[in-house]
Image (cartoon, rainbow, N blue to C red):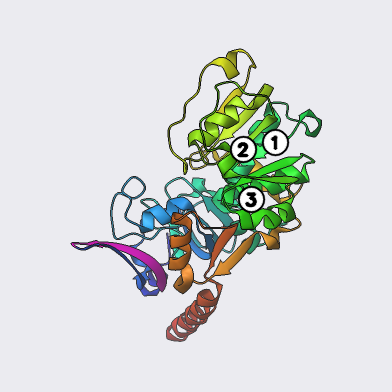
Amino acid sequence: MFNTHFMEDTKYKAFVTKESDSGFSNSIENLSVADLKDNDLIVKVSYSSLNYKDALSASGNRGVTREYPHTPGINAVGEVIESNSSDFKTGEKIIVTGYDLGMNTFGGFGQYISIPANWAIPLPKELSEAEAMSIGTAGLTAGLCVRKLLMNDFTPDSGDVLVTGASGGVGSVAVMVLSKLGFKVVALTGKKDQADYLESLGASSVIMRSEMEEQGKPLQRGIYQGGVDTVGGNILSNFISQTSQRGAITCCGNVAGPSFNATVYPFILRANHLVGIDSAQTPISIKSEIWNKFALEWYIDEIDNLYKSVSIDEIVPEIEKILNGEQVGRVILSHRWLNFWGMINVKQYCSNSNKKN
């Protein structure tokens, strides 16, 4: 059973999206831990990170979040404060990405979350909390893409790999991991001023989105052994057409459009694969595998170049950037300063309770 006094007496700050007759609005509010859904774990969140799905939730997109008021944040890292599960002890650091967090369950844009134990993964000891959220759901998606490519017998000497939407959250991590594994990575971006940034992440060359935006022939010269597509639309159509024999493309985004034109020729004449990636509902065992890879053989030495940290009061401009396609790299939301003062209040409460007893 959870500590009833803690539940009733603990307040926390959260980013809240509300609906009114005039539309949707966002504010920072004081909420009560007691109002969170009953679950196995209560977690004090140290960091979350901003993803496209969070921006949609904060904008009132009912395809992501059905009921408001709501707190976005589809991923979080922090400390278990209360546990009704034999799998996790209080004080243990955990990661949670996807499932229903930040969609219809209050998410990581608040200082506390309440989640089922089977959503949580122990934080690998080799990763700091900030590093974990700089990877976050976007990095997990990139890792799942790389895993599938390697399962399709990708090797660095088999040809170039393309990463589309390379300056975004998923794309930037994919560039870094593939480069670390020895692949020659071609990065596609719509931001000409990000070429140096992408090369610093490990891209061997950078091409502009305009080179692949117009619909081309259904079967073009094979340039790539495959890679990671984060955008969809005509870019994915051309990517499929330009993939060489027995190649593979992982598909995980639709910012350039949910539909694309294709024929069967790349699949029946070149035996190519198009592999869908859904990180939210990936089995917890596979998520754990990917996180351990990020902690060890996929550890990103230049990870500090990947993200910037903002406070809860600074998140709205970042939401606007990601909705406008202007985000570069990763943005993490830090609750640490708020948690510092919150911990003082918790300690003060415990001290007063002990005096009463």
**x then y, percent, for residue 181:** 77, 42
Q: Residue at 49% across / 84% down in the picture? A: 348
Rendered image: mark on residue 20: none
> If you read the primary sequence from the N terminus, does the residue marked by circle 1 or circle 3 appear first?
1
Q: State the image coordinates of residue 240 (x, y, percent, origin top left).
A: 58, 27
Q: Residue at x 63, y 50 (%)?
A: 172
Residue 302 located left or right of residue 131: right
Q: Position of residue 155 (x, y in %)?
A: 77, 31
Relative depth, front residue between 123 and 98: 98
Q: Quadrant of the C terminus?
A: bottom left
Which residue is at 47% across, 40% downward?
A: 254
Split into 4 quadrants, where in the image is the N terminus?
bottom left
Tell me the number on the disc at residue 161: 1
Q: Secondary structure at mark 1?
A: strand
148 part of magenta stretch? no
Q: Are marks 2 and 1 in contact (CB under 8 Å)?
A: yes
- Distance of mark 2 from mark 1, alpha carbons? 8 Å
- Three-letter amino acid code at the position of disc 1: Val
Q: Which residue is mark 3?
A: 172
* Residue at the disc numbered 2: 228
Q: In the image, 114: left or right of 210? A: left
Determine whether, in the image, residue 316 is placed left or right of residue 341: left
Q: Earlier in the sequence, mark 3 or mark 2?
A: 3
**Depicted 144 relative to depicted 108: above or below:** above
Report if residue 288 is visible in the image.
no
Q: Which residues are magenta?
A: 11-21
Name the residue nearer the viewer: 248 or 236. Answer: 236
- Say above or below: 87 vs 81: above
- Amino acid carrying label 2: it is Val
Secondary structure mostly seen in the magenta stretch: strand
Q: Which tag, 2 or 1, sits closer to the chain's start?
A: 1
